[in-house]
Amino acid sequence: MMHMTLYWGKDVTLLIDSWKTDSWLSYLLTLLACFLFSSFYQYMEDRRLRFRSLASSNPSQPSSVGPDAPLLLKYRRSAKFATAVFFGINSAIGYLLMLAIMSFNGGVFLAIVLGLAVGYLFFRCADEETVVVENVCACA
């Protein structure tokens, strides 16, 4: 049965029909997986923003460019490609986390929110001053 309100209990179907918890051990392992997956989301977001800042950094002046100029341009192109790949992976992870929360289980909700908070603390909190995000929308 699919719940439409927040409920507490160990019986959860998460994302796919074969991921069902029927014991406390499977429920706790599911909560641990949700916690780790949401922390990994913050790690990937940090990597994406770092590649983005690397890809958007201003190149050197053309008059002072040495023999390594083609290498630097190739490096920036690969950083832009890596940014796009990280954005796609991060979007997929974000949507999967949203769908997991839509199971409406209170433990899953808390595990994901705590995982996001702990991941932010470990991976993104120290870079608050160095990474500038141009778009204030949380979904961009």
Image: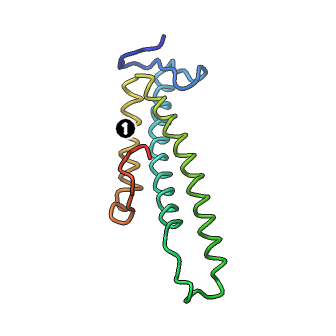
Percent position of residue 140, x then y: 44, 47
50 vs 71, left or right, is: left
**Residue at screen point 36% across, 19% down:** 8
Percent position of residue 30, x then y: 49, 30
Question: Against 70, is 12 above or below?
Answer: above
Three-letter amino acid code at disc 1?
A: Val
**Residue at screen point 66% across, 78% down:** 70
**Residue at screen point 56% across, 89% down:** 63
**Towards the viewer: 80 or 3:** 80
Percent position of residue 5, x then y: 36, 17
**Residue at screen point 40% across, 18% down:** 9
Question: Against 67, is 1 above or below?
Answer: above
Label 1: which residue? Answer: 113
**Towards the viewer: 9 or 57:** 57
Question: Against 64, is 94 above or below?
Answer: above
Graded by Cα atoms within 10 Å as few (under 14), some (14 to 19) or many (20 or more), the crowding at tag 1 reads: some
Quarter location, residue 83: bottom right
Which residue is situated farthest in the top direction here? Answer: 1
Q: Secondary structure at mark 1?
A: helix
**Towards the viewer: 52 or 30:** 52
